[in-house]
Every structure is written in structure tokens, then in C-alpha cells.
Image (cartoon, helix red, strand yellow):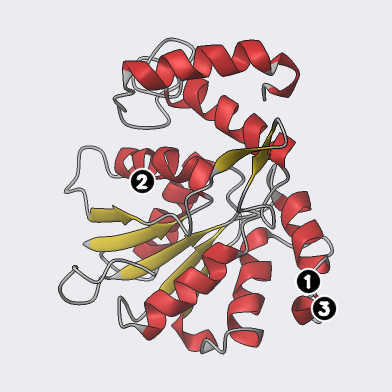
Amino acid sequence: MPPTKLHGPLDAIVLLGSSCLKSIQVASKALAMGMSKKIVVSGGLGHSTSFLVKNVKARADLKDIHTDNRPEADILADILVQRFGVNASTLIVENVSTNCGANAWETKRVLHTMGIELNSAILIQDPTMQRRTHASFERAWRGERVPLFVSYAPFVPEVIEHDGELILSNGDDAWDYSRFVSLVLGEIPRILDSSSGYGPLGADYIEHVDIPITVLEAHERLTGAFPQLIRA
């Protein structure tokens, strides 16, 4: 569940589009707990859309959710209303963004259009993209008063050894093991603040992120072990 140590409601719960269905449940619980009175659902058609559709179709309790050729935010909004009983009037839907950075900019645009000033928000995203999402939202408000952004991953993925093989012990309803490894390996090059990364020294899609040396060393070892899974 979202952290209870925060005092008072936030201006928005921002649910980012991904293939991770657990995030929808977490967002609905955050709303029920009074973390905010609004959920902003953000996501158009992107690299995770086909995986989201596949995961929705695999669930018997979501068989009435229409998925064909629909933006991620529209699918997630329907699940919030039809599966978790969220009142549709509490939802703000942004369904044109196609990537993590655009999620932030388009969310900002929609809120501005509606005359909503964002002072605080909880960000709920696929855990493999949580850090980059946070940095993307900070980037969108650069040069302005940056709202209080609180990141909350719906769960923490764990890899264990089983019968001599590495397997994903949880989260396999979001991605299989190969896709999980591919997503994780693809994140480090993206959040690097270098000429080839997404930070200010590169594409400038996100704010600077400090990456511990131990993480960089682990990434180097894993890319050597799984070169076929590196996401471009």
C-alpha cells in the first residue's frame, strides 16, 4: 500500500501506463485511503501497450475490458471503474503520451488546461521505470516551483535461484523473466547523465540521477551475461 506517513491528501495520484496491472490496484487503494481525491491516468500508445493488452486478456476478471487499438490510459481507467469501483468523476485521463518523458509533460499540460495547480503527487509506475519516471516529472517542472513528487512502486521485483537457474519470484503477471531483464538493463543507459543518456548532459529528458557505482558495475556484469536482452 502507499505510505501512510504522508500527512494530508496530495493533489493527485498519477497512475502511469505500463503492463503492470498491480499498479492499478495500488492506485485504487491510495484513492480509498484518502491519499488524494483525484487519479490522473497517463499513457497513450507506447512500447508497453501490447504487453498491457496481453496481460489484461489473460485475466478472467478483466474479460469485459475493451483493449483493441486503445491507449493505455483508457484501458487503465476502465479497469479502475469496472474492476475496482472507482468513481469515473475522480479520474483525469491523459491518453496521448507515448513515452515516460511525455507522460510528465502531457500530465502537466492537461492539468494546466483544467486550471489545476499541482503542488504534490504520488507517482505509481512499473517498478523498473519508477526512478526515470520521477526524474521525468522533475524535468517537466524545471525552472518552476517543483511539486512534491512521491514515488511508490507497486511492488519490488525479486530474482531468486531455483534449481540452478535464475527466475523471477514475483511480478510475472507484469512481464516474463526475459522482458524483466531487458527492461532493467535498458534503464541504466537511459538514466545516465552522459552524452548518450537521457540526463541534462544528453537528451535532457530527465533531471540528473546519481547512480551508485555498485549499480553501474552490476549493470556491466549483467549486460555481459545477457547481451541478447539489451533493449535498444
Quadrant (top left, top right, bottom left, bottom right) of the C terminus: top right
Q: Which one is earlier in the sequence, the residue at label 2 or at label 3? A: 3
Whether 15 is drawn above or below 174: the answer is below
> Which residue does the numbered mark 3 point to in the structure image?
63
Whether 114 is drawn above or below 204: the answer is below
* Of 27 and 145, the residue lying toward us: 27
Indicate the position of residue 204 as horizontal and vertical percent values. 39, 25
The quarter of the displayed image where residue 142 is located: top left
Q: Amino acid at mark 1?
A: Arg
Whether the residues at callouts 2 and 1 have beta carbons within 8 Å, the answer is no
Mark 2 vs mark 1: in front? 1
Q: Which one is earlier in the sequence, the residue at label 2 or at label 1? A: 1
Cα–Cα span, label 1 and label 3: 7 Å
Name the element at disc 3.
loop
Whether 92 is drawn above or below 227: the answer is below
Please give the label number shown on residue 59.
1
Residue at the image point whose x is 58% and y is 50% from the top:
97
Q: Is residue 180 left or right of residue 67?
A: left
> Which residue does the numbered mark 2 point to in the structure image?
137
Whether 177 is drawn above or below 3: the answer is above
Residue at the image point whose x is 75% and y is 51% from the top:
51
Q: Residues within 10 Å of mark 2 (few under 14, many from 20)?
A: many
Q: Amino acid at mark 3?
A: Lys
Quadrant (top left, top right, bottom left, bottom right) of the N terminus: bottom left
Indicate the position of residue 85 as horizontal and vertical percent values. 56, 89
Name the element at disc 1.
loop
Cα–Cα span, label 2 and label 1: 31 Å
* Of 16 and 83, the residue lying toward us: 83
Q: Is residue 144 left or right of residue 229?
A: left
**Residue 56 appearing in the image:** yes
Q: Residues within 10 Å of mark 3 (few under 14, many from 20)?
A: few
Q: Amino acid at mark 2?
A: Phe
